[in-house]
Image: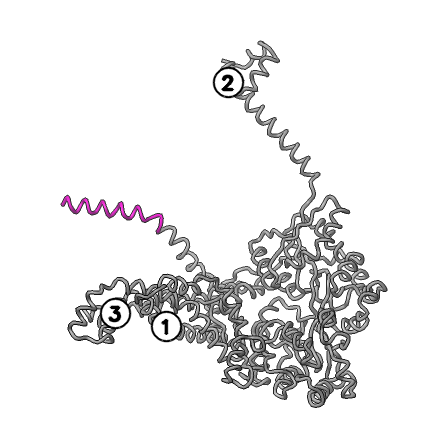
Amino acid sequence: MVASLGVRFPGLILINNFFGRTFSRFFSRGWKRLSLIFLALAVTAGALLVGVGVRAQQPVTISFLLRAVEADQMQGLAEQFMAENPDIRIEMVRGPNAADAVENLYTTSFLLGDSPYDILFSDVVWIPKFAAAGWLLDLSDRVSEADLADFLGADVTAGLYQDGLYRMPFRSDMGMLYYRTDLLDQVGLDPPETFSDLIAASEAIQAQTDVSWGFVWQGLQYEGIVTNFVELIAGYGGFWIDPDSLEVGLDQPAGIQAAEFMKTVIADSITPPGVTNYVEEDSLRQFENGNAAFLRNWPYVWAEANREGSPVAGKIALKPMVHDEGQQSAACLGGWGFGISATTPHPEEAWRVVEFFTSYGPMKQFVTEFAYVPSRRALFTDPDVLAEFPHFEQLLEVAETAIPRPPVGQYAQVSDILQRYLSASISDQMTPEAAMQAAAGETRRVLGVES
Amino acid sequence: MTRDYIRERQQRTGWLLVAPALVLLLLVYAFPILRAFWLSFFTENLSTNLEPVFSGLDNYAQLVQDGRFWQSMRNTAVFTVLTLIFELGLGLIIALSLDQAFRGRGLVRTVAILPWALPTALIALAWRWIFNTEFGVWNDILLRLQLIASPVNWLGDPFWAMVAVIAADVWKTTSFVAILLLAGLQSISQDLYEAHALDGASPWQSFRQITLPLIAPQIVIAMLFRFAQSFGIFDLIQVMTGGGPGGATEMVSIYIYAAVMRYLDFGYGAALVTVTFLVLVAIVGLTWLYLARLRAKTE
């Protein structure tokens, strides 16, 4: 009987031989089954215990999704972190290179309720929506006011949503005015301060030199036209949406003036008519080829337009965007930072990763290696950084004028409204005034405020 | 009696055999539609923390006043009607040419289907470059031929942007219509034409009296396919214009995508889906009724 059991369970033969006859007699029918069950249970439990032990020694994986180009650039820092922190493994999932495609991937994964990503590597404008949806952890008790004071003011404000802090700034970005120093010298003018200066300088340059266009910017119906507009409306002393009162300022005089400015520069041939289809690259190409005197764009242009072989290398300078008489310059804030998923099983480890990337040393390494703009104020005046990028001195001046886009949960929606009406206005489908009134009305409806 | 019994049993077996397929169809078609319909009576967006809150007909009341929805509906209608007309016309011409015997016909037929076989997103990207104001081929050709004095901003102008997306869609899907019609043409016996010609009919008469009536079923099928696809066009527009300028090429599908995926407004998105679905069903239903009546008349 025991032998037949041994055929089915070879291990039992061993037990039987080892313990001898007495034990085998003990193996009467009922007991036999029971003992087998116990044996199986013991083995399973043992295996589980061993497994847990091994698991505890294995590193925790912290994963996030980002554009593939950026994953390449951040790989070095990630490896450095893992070498210093063997208990954490950073997994960077390489996404598409279009930012909105990445946003959609994050959105779908969060909608499923159990996001595979522990960290959200986020464009500055996603934060309100993700925070409003309850997908992010509030980070405010993990970081002190003093620590936050080291970052650019706008970069911190942009991470706030209804008293919570949902984003730690990594690299910053802001819009500014680039100009051709040689052309200004030629016509004997100073860099423009106001909107009328800009128009006057453009007209002088277009009349006296062979440069065809004065001022190029981004006018396609997409987020870019909104970033241009944010700078114009603030330059006229107005605002788009007040985040506290949810008041909409598009149909106030400053809003209409800003929309009219966009249209005027096209109508007066200061800006090429093709601008209604321009993204950053198109406007840069005009400026870089020497076809335009002024360009509104982001910090990456500096390196791009000054590279060897560029027709305008060494002939350009940057300054904060122009403004109306008696008003202040404004730069639309962009940039990327880190949030932590509300459903991550490892919030502590995720925070350590975020803390590492946003700390002084790694950020310095990253911005000097890839010519990005830091979000820590001190890095703009760090001697090593300045040695590499002398223009950071002016850039800090621009950075201090940066303003975030309105932190409302329905940001994507209100931005779309503005994009559509601005595009309609500059492509002659509506007057600027009618467009801004319609945009303001729709924005109020979306925000649920009475007009 | 026995015969009835056998028939009944056969019918029951038949139903049993198609039951799994029916269940599958119900799950993948009926369930999502009914669920969207149900959801359209709720407000579920960021202001309700993504929880559904019953709101009756609110979404529909909002929809009636939503200029953007009606604009996108109008755009979709214009796009669908114009692409259908051009694709049928050009498709028929291509099909008739490919039906003729000539050297290298196989090769030409293969080449003709190529645009349809290529991924739409790539095609759209290519067309976007073709219509680029400063660097596009199309402006370059027109400038060289001195047909235009200065570059035209094709995709930045509301009218020309619509023309451009229609042109791109016609270029891409005409071959699909042509292939379907070609199949119809090849099933027509040559004897009919011979007999008709002997009776003294002109080629034009043969075309109207033999070809057209006999490929009518293929025309209807091609048009139904194309109608459904044009009405739901997404990728081509998204890549070529993103719906711009100023919403001039925004189609219903693009708006629904924005409402659901970007604004996270699920309730309103469901209302948009429901209305669009009903419009689609109504149009197909009316076409079907019209065709049925036409058939009844000819019989």
Q: Position of residue A221 (x, y in %)?
A: 58, 74
Q: Name the residue under label 3.
A: B211
What secondary structure is the stretch in magenta mostly built from?
helix
Query: Mark 3 falls within which chain?
Result: B
Q: Mark 1 points at which residue?
A: B90
Find out whether the residues at labels 1 and 3 contact each other: C-beta distance under 8 Å. Answer: no
Q: Earlier in the sequence, mark 1 or mark 3?
A: 1
The answer to whether any part of residue A444 appears in the image is no
Q: In this view, does A191 lie to the left or right of A257?
A: right
Residue type (three-letter) at the residue carrying disc 2: Val
SS class of the residue under badge 1?
A: helix
User: Which is closer to the viewer, label 2 or label 1?
Assistant: 1
Label 3 crowd bin: few (<14), some (14–19), many (20+), radius 10 Å: some
| Residue at (58, 27) in percent of width and height | A41
| Residue at (76, 54) in percent of width and height | A356
Q: Name the residue under label 2.
A: A7
SS class of the residue under badge 2?
A: helix
SS class of the residue under badge 3?
A: helix
Query: Mark 1 falls within which chain?
Result: B
Q: Is residue A220 left or right of residue A385?
A: left
Q: How far apart are marks 1 and 3 (CA)?
A: 16 Å
Q: Bounds of the magenta span?
A: B1-21
Residue type (three-letter) at the residue carrying disc 1: Leu
Q: In this view, does B226 lie to the left or right of A338?
A: left
